[in-house]
């Protein structure tokens, strides 16, 4: 929601410092989740406060986990509200990742600083310009996605809601069977295309419109993102084909791989019945996520790339102890401070994942539900694994305390951990 | 609290926008004859709280 950040520029005395940027980021997501839950509480569905807050947080963080067990019977107004929450969450995170995260130096996001001399005081007018362009691009992609869904056979209402949750890589659907309900290859292809378009850095669209026509083929992150998709699909195809698995279906492999990697969470098959190897692959994909500066969640491609370069560098240093090896990412030199930022992010990501999984298992959940629940919440994917929260399950039967733990995981994952964790440091509150 | 004036101000704007966006599902409720006061009530509460933040005098 930080695209409305520029509105603080109405009064020239209103400028944000770093402390306020952190506070605003956390409180805006939290307050929208709180007030966004009110329609669920007041509706004919009469959700409990826990359920309403879970659904709202799942929406605004573009997670896509739901506690509504019978979506087909849910009021249309509620279905649209879920889609609106995800759509707002999607554009909010893009603008935040491009404008605020770099100045907050969260988990290596400083790499995406708009220019090297940006300061928190300068970010406001620049945010206005960028935010408006991003809103136009995001809205245009949503509209084109809705039209394509409608052309390929979805009803008008379903086209509208699904296009909003597709481009936000959120994954809320109006049906328990998710996108599989439509049983249409064309709708699934259309969905995959727009999920990928929502998963690449939105700043690339602005650069493309500014004349950089080769941005999509030259961007390191986009290239690696596509390579991971292709590699994952190939591995799953080989495994399911050579093990003569009865679930072998190119259509399902393509769709679910893209959906899980990007954290969308749409499903068209029960992939948790494909065997333990595909489940492991899907769990790994949940952690990787999409590109920074997009609507996707997870660790993000650029951090995986820099971690890979760092490990490669360490191996070289073992062979050539006196050698000096520079790490370069996208033609920029990467210094030790930046690498420390990335490594600490990834370390904390897994620490929090294990803490969440442990807490969930303490609430009485079985091993696979606790583990996949923690993974799906911190990576904002949507469905977990297993019979309860798996591809065709929902989160309604979980104890209330588990739902609260999952909502904490969702907001931590969405705001890149540190934006929330820094608020708990006493030094943060000192002037 | 004066340090957080901008934070409250922006949160107020966000909540007002959220409250206004709750009117969109009301249109859908009309179309599908599912009219109830859920979105209207939620919208009023959200806008009132947003206005309180927006006009804070800290």
Image (cartoon, rainbow, N blue to C red):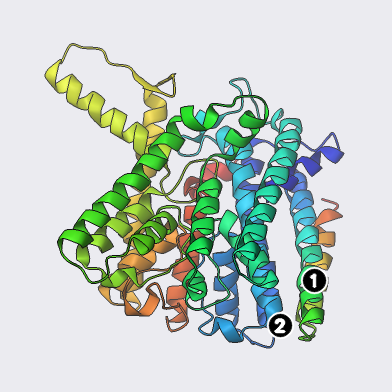
Q: Which residue is mark 2?
A: A42
Q: Residue furthest left?
A: A319
Q: Residue A231, how many percent across, how many down?
A: 30, 45
Q: Residues within 10 Å of mark 1 (few under 14, many from 20)?
A: many
Residue B12 on image: x %, y %: 78, 56
Give coordinates of residue A171: x percent, y percent: 52, 64
Residue A239 lies left or right of residue A114; in this view the side is left
A424 or A315: which is nearer to us?
A: A315
Residue A137 quadrant: top right
Q: Is residue A253 above or below residue A402?
A: above
Q: Are marks 2 and 1 on the same chain?
A: no
Q: Circle 2 marks a residue in which chain?
A: A
Whether residue A32 is visible, yes or no, is yes
Q: Residue at x 71, y 27 (%)?
A: A122
Q: Quadrant of residue B44?
A: bottom right
Chain of residue at mark 1: B
Residue B31 figure quarter: bottom right
Residue underneath mark 1: B43
Choose between B21 and A279: the one closer to the eye: A279
Say above or below: A315 vs A93.
Answer: above
- Give how far across and how far down residue A68 sits, in percent: 54, 80
The answer to whether residue A85 is above or below residue A114 is below
Query: Dot 2, crowdedness within 10 Å: few (<14), some or many (≥20)?
Result: some
A10 or A112, which is in the foreground? Answer: A112
For the residues labelled 2 and 1, say whether their Cβ atoms are less than 8 Å apart: no
Q: Is residue A108 left or right of residue A347?
A: right
Secondary structure under tag 1 reads helix
Query: Residue at left 86%, top 40%?
Result: A10
Q: Nearer the viewer, residue A41 or A404?
A: A41
- At a point 86% along the width and 52% down the height, the residue shown is B57
SS of the residue at dot 2?
A: helix
């Amino acid at each position: 929601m930080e695209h409305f950040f520029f509105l603080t520029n109405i009064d020239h005395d209103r400028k944000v410092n770093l402390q306020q940027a952190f506070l605003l980021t956390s409180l805006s997501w939290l307050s929208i989740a709180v007030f966004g839950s009110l329609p669920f509480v007041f509706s004919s569905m009469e959700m409990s406060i826990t359920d309403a807050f879970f659904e709202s947080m799942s929406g605004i963080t573009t997670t896509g986990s739901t506690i509504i067990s019978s979506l087909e019977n849910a009021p249309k107004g509620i279905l649209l509200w879920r889609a609106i929450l995800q759509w707002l969450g999607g554009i909010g995170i893009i603008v935040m990742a491009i404008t605020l995260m770099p100045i907050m130096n969260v988990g290596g996001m400083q790499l995406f600083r708009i220019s090297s001399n940006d300061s928190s005081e300068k970010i406001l007018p620049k945010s206005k310009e960028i935010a408006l362009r991003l809103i136009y691009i995001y809205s245009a992609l949503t509209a084109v996605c809705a039209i394509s869904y409608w052309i390929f056979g979805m009803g008008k209402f379903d086209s509208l809601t699904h296009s909003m949750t597709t481009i936000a890589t959120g994954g809320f659907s109006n049906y328990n069977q998710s996108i599989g309900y439509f049983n249409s290859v064309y709708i699934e292809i259309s969905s995959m295309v727009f999920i990928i378009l929502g998963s690449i850095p939105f700043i690339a669209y602005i650069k493309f419109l500014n004349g950089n026509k080769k941005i999509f083929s030259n961007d390191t992150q986009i290239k690696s993102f596509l390579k991971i998709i292709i590699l994952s699909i190939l591995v799953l195809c080989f495994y399911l084909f050579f093990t003569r698995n009865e679930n072998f279906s190119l259509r399902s492999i393509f769709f679910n791989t893209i959906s899980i990697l990007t954290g969308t969470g749409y499903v068209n098959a029960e992939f948790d019945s494909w065997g333990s190897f595909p489940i492991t692959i899907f769990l790994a994909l949940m952690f990787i996520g999409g590109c920074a500066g997009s609507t996707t969640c997870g660790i993000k491609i650029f951090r995986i790339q820099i971690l890979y370069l760092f490990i490669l560098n360490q191996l070289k240093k073992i062979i050539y102890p006196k050698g000096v090896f520079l790490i370069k990412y996208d033609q920029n030199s990467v210094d030790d401070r930046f690498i420390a930022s990335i490594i600490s992010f990834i370390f904390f990501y897994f620490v929090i994942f294990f803490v969440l999984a442990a807490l969930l298992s303490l609430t009485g959940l079985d091993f696979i539900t606790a583990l996949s629940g923690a993974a799906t919440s911190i990576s904002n994917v949507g469905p977990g694994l297993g019979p309860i929260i798996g591809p065709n399950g929902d989160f309604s039967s979980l104890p209330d305390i588990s739902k609260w733990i999952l909502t904490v995981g969702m907001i931590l994952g969405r705001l890149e951990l540190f934006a929330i964790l820094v608020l708990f440091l006493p030094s943060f509150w000192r002037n | 609290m004066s340090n957080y004036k901008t934070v409250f101000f922006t949160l107020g704007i966000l909540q007002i926008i959220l409250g206004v966006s709750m009117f969109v599902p009301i249109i859908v409720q009309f179309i599908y004859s599912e009219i109830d006061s859920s979105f209207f009530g939620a919208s009023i509460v959200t806008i009132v709280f947003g206005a309180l933040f927006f006009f804070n005098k800290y």
